[in-house]
């Protein structure tokens, strides 16, 4: 499995930074890269007695899985060069194989790490040019093969494709050597992010090699370059650890600035692309950089005399193709701004149309921020004129800081994108607003887990049913992941479809169980499905392994309803049982998921008892004759959660039963005869007169007549007619024909087909619902 670049680089840099001398540095370099990102590693160091570009290099083969030479003991330090164990030259389909050293390559037949092999490096050769340029070479470079011939000889066999990577060890005072990374022919090729990670890790190793003395483990005096390089390495290790700990963009930039100012520079400016690219997406418009962070170390003297750039005019900068800034960003490596090209790039970045001032000399570094696939910004490090100028080794430090920051920014953008997707997924899976069915009031809450993913499998739903009934659903899919949320969405959609068929609660759970088994045997969920009838003041509940609901009566008494527990959805082969209970007026029902009552600090039954006591206390504060507000009840219930109680998602659904009074309901049965429409009109007129709604008689009689006439044409059993007076006047006509009516535009020559057109024009709303025994056609009229 491919290692995470940011995490791998942080771990590897930490190990390299702890190394005390060059041999340990190279051993750590080998131990961290083999075999996670490479199958073999060859390290070449410049000969210590040569300082000119034409110096020779040394090569040493170390054996053993720990990259430690055979015969090396604690009393005998390892030599200052390292090679991972070479792999056998196995033939491969593409004809390539990892290079295996032989007698013709000058090892003298020894593989125990005791023989140094000198590789001549001519000043005019390709290898010297590669090391001086400091750029990594892959198969896409024409200089790779000539450089490898200088290193390995003409007969070396290497794997084909992008499985060979030559990385210079760019030290503070020039190239300290080179590292050759190899992969087996049967392994995937090096990618862009692999190359970048290995380049930065090699740079850390180069800094460690040049910053420590192989001959003496004691530290050099503070004034020597070696001591300063060692301090730089420790600073880079501490700074990268600080940057790598952050996960969000602001935290990463803050970590960079706090690590740099004032230890490395007195000011830092961070410009990022606007907008930041996500993944592989390509920007359609021109590349623009926006100033995201500007942090400075306050001076003791007058701040007005500090000659730092006035960054207020450089809030947004467009990178024009071919410009000086574009060329510097393309070069990837940090540069001093005292060169004309770099100074022009800095002028373009900061304030091209206004005067700006930067300190003279090498007191400003412009470092491109390169993510996994592209440059995503730039950082400017500044020092005051009275401070010491930057040294050549500081360019390497700036490169490490820029690379770690860019990788962190890349990950923060991806993390933010994933968090946004998770939030959007969870939002779309849950109802945006609750319906307002007659006879019941509703309130709901959802809280994601505090220490896990933002998305989970808890859900709640409220589904209006025919006859002013309403289905209350709460469920919980096991797990916290995108998969759990996707399974939850499918189960919720299935429950809505089954509710539309007006199936009994136990049948709904049975079909949900079958659906869960079709989705996979490893997916399980708990669910509680309840149907409330405001006319009969009854509620029917079926349970599938879910915590029981709590019923809060008017007056303050709360009880845990005795509901058969059932087996979770997805077990298969089990029956579900439904119970029918009274739903008293002004009583409140609490449905919830186990995250509310169960945690590491308490078991589920202790939590249920605490929930019951909390509901009773809230009701008593509201008074004996008035039920508590549902919103306040939900908030009070959630207040019972402690700091360690947010281990799981929480879904909470509260419903208050108001019901529909018997005097507001009129119900009749009509035989499917030709006289049925006329009788329906008379019955509707009398009911409206009894309710004082005579002004609706004409429109309601016309609509009732049209709907009943359509039912009489097809029904073979008695037709039901029901009127309900709530905030609207609702009429429901039921028959035994499952076919639903469709609204269509009648032609001029048609004798019928205009009834539903009239219903659609005169009624506030209308619809039809298929039942197990037929269908119900309903319409609503606004009350005056």
Image (spheres, helix red, strand yellow):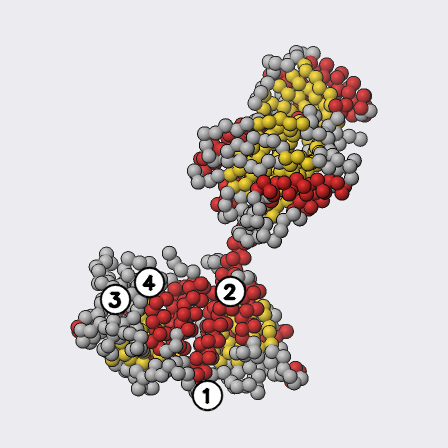
Q: Nearer the viewer, residue 468 or 371?
A: 468
- Image height check: is 708 above or below 520? above
Front of the two marks 1 and 3:
1
In the image: residue 588, left or right of residue 176 = right
Q: Which mark is residue 35?
A: 4
Q: Is residue 114 visible?
A: yes
Q: Earlier in the sequence, mark 3 or mark 2?
A: 3
Q: Quadrant of residue 726?
A: top right
Question: In whole angstroms, how far apart are the C-alphas of marks 4 and 2?
Answer: 25 Å
Crowding around mark 2 (Cα neighbors within 10 Å: few <14, some 14 to 19, many 20+) is some
* Image coordinates for residue 101, horizontal then vertical, percent: 21, 70
Residue at mark 3? 86
Q: Are marks 3 and 2 in contact (CB under 8 Å)?
A: no
Instruction: Give the spatial CA distance, label 3 vs label 4.
Output: 12 Å
Q: Is disc 4 placed on a helix, strand or loop?
A: loop
Q: Which mark is residue 223?
A: 1
Tag 2–tag 1 contact (CB < 8 Å): no
Q: Tag 2 or tag 4, which sits nearer the N-term?
A: 4
**Label 3 CA crowd tier, 10 Å (few <14, some 14–19, many 20+):** some
Cα separation between marks 1 and 4: 39 Å
- Viewer-side label of 1, 4: 1
| Disc assigned to residue 245 | 2
| Image quadrant in which you'd find residue 678 | top right
What residue lies at 28% left-to-right and 61% top-to-bottom? 184
Task: Tell me if residue 637 comes above or below residue 312 in the rendering.
Answer: above
Which mark is first along the chain, 1 or 2?
Answer: 1
Looking at the image, which residue is at 24% across and 62% down?
Answer: 96
**Label 3 element class:** loop
């Amino acid at each position: 499995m491919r290692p995470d670049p940011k995490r791998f680089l942080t771990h590897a840099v930490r190990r390299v930074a702890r190394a005390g001398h060059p041999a340990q540095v190279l051993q750590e370099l080998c131990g961290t890269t083999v075999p996670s990102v490479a199958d073999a590693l060859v390290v070449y160091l410049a000969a210590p007695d040569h300082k000119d570009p034409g110096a020779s290099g040394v090569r040493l083969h170390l054996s053993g899985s720990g990259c430690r030479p055979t015969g090396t003991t604690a009393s005998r330090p390892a030599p200052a060069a390292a090679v991972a164990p070479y792999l056998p030259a196995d033939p491969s389909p593409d004809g390539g194989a990892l290079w295996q050293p032989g007698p013709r390559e000058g090892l003298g037949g020894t593989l125990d790490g005791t023989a140094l092999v000198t590789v001549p490096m001519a000043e005019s050769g390709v290898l010297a040019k590669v090391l001086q340029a400091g750029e990594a070479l892959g198969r896409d470079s024409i200089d790779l093969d000539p450089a490898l011939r200088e290193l390995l000889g003409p007969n070396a066999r290497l794997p084909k494709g992008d499985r060979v990577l030559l990385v210079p060890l760019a030290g503070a005072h020039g190239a300290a050597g080179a590292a050759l990374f190899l992969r087996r022919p049967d392994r995937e090729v090096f990618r862009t992010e692999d190359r970048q990670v290995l380049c930065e890790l090699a740079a850390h190793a180069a800094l460690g090699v040049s910053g420590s003395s192989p001959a003496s483990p004691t530290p050099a005096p503070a004034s020597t370059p070696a001591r300063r390089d060692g301090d730089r390495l420790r600073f880079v290790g501490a700074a990268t650890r600080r940057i790598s700990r952050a996960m969000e963009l602001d935290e990463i930039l803050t970590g960079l600035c706090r690590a740099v100012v004032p230890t490395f520079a007195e000011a830092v400016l961070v410009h990022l692309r606007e907008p930041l690219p996500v993944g592989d997406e390509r920007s359609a418009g021109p590349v623009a950089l926006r100033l995201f962070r500007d942090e400075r170390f306050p001076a003791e003297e007058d701040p007005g005399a500090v000659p730092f750039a006035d960054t207020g005019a450089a809030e947004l900068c467009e990178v024009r193709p071919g410009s000086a800034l574009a060329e510097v960003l393309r070069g990837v490596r940090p540069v001093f701004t005292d060169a004309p090209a770099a100074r022009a790039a800095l002028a373009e970045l900061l304030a091209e149309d206004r005067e700006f001032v930067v300190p003279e000399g090498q007191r400003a570094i412009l470092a491109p921020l390169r993510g996994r696939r592209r440059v995503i910004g730039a950082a400017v490090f500044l020092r005051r004129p009275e401070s010491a100028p930057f040294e050549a080794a500081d360019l390497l430090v700036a490169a490490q800081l820029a690379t770690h920051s860019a990788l962190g920014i890349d990950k923060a953008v991806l993390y933010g994108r994933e968090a946004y997707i998770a939030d959007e997924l969870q939002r779309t899976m849950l109802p945006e607003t609750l319906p307002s069915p007659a006879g019941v009031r509703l309130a709901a809450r959802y809280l994601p887990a505090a220490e896990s993913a933002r998305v989970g499998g808890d859900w709640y739903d409220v589904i209006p049913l025919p006859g002013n009934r309403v289905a209350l659903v709460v469920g919980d899919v096991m797990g916290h992941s995108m998969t759990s949320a996707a399974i939850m969405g499918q189960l919720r959609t299935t429950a809505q479809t089954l509710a539309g068929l007006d199936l009994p609660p136990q049948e709904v759970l049975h079909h949900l169980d079958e659906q869960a088994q079709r989705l996979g045997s490893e997916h399980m969920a708990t669910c509680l499905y309840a149907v409330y009838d405001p006319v009969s003041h009854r509620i029917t509940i079926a349970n599938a392994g879910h915590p029981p609901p709590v019923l809060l009566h008017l007056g303050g008494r709360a009880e845990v309803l005795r509901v058969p527990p059932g087996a979770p959805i997805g077990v298969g082969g089990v029956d579900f049982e439904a119970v029918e209970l009274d739903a008293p007026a002004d009583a409140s029902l609490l449905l919830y998921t186990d995250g509310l009552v169960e945690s590491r600090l308490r078991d589920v039954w202790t939590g249920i008892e605490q929930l019951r006591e909390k509901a009773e206390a809230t009701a008593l504060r509201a008074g004996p004759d008035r039920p508590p507000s549902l919103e306040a009840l939900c908030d009070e219930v959630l207040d019972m959660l402690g700091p360690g109680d947010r281990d799981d998602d929480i879904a909470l659904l509260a419903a208050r039963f108001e019901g529909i009074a018997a005097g507001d309901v009129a119900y009749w049965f009509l035989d499917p005869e030709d006289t049925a429409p006329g009788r329906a009109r008379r019955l509707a007129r009398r009911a409206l007169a009894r309710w004082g709604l005579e002004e609706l008689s004409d429109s309601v009689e016309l609509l009732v007549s049209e709907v009943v006439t359509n039912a009489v044409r097809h029904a073979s059993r008695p037709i039901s007619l029901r009127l309900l007076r709530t905030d609207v006047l609702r009429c429901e006509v039921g028959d035994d024909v499952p076919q639903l009516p469709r609204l269509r535009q009648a032609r001029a020559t048609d004798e019928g087909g205009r009834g539903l057109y009239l219903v659609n024009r005169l009624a506030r709303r209308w619809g039809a619902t298929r039942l197990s025994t037929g269908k119900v056609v309903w319409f609503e009229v606004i009350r005056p």
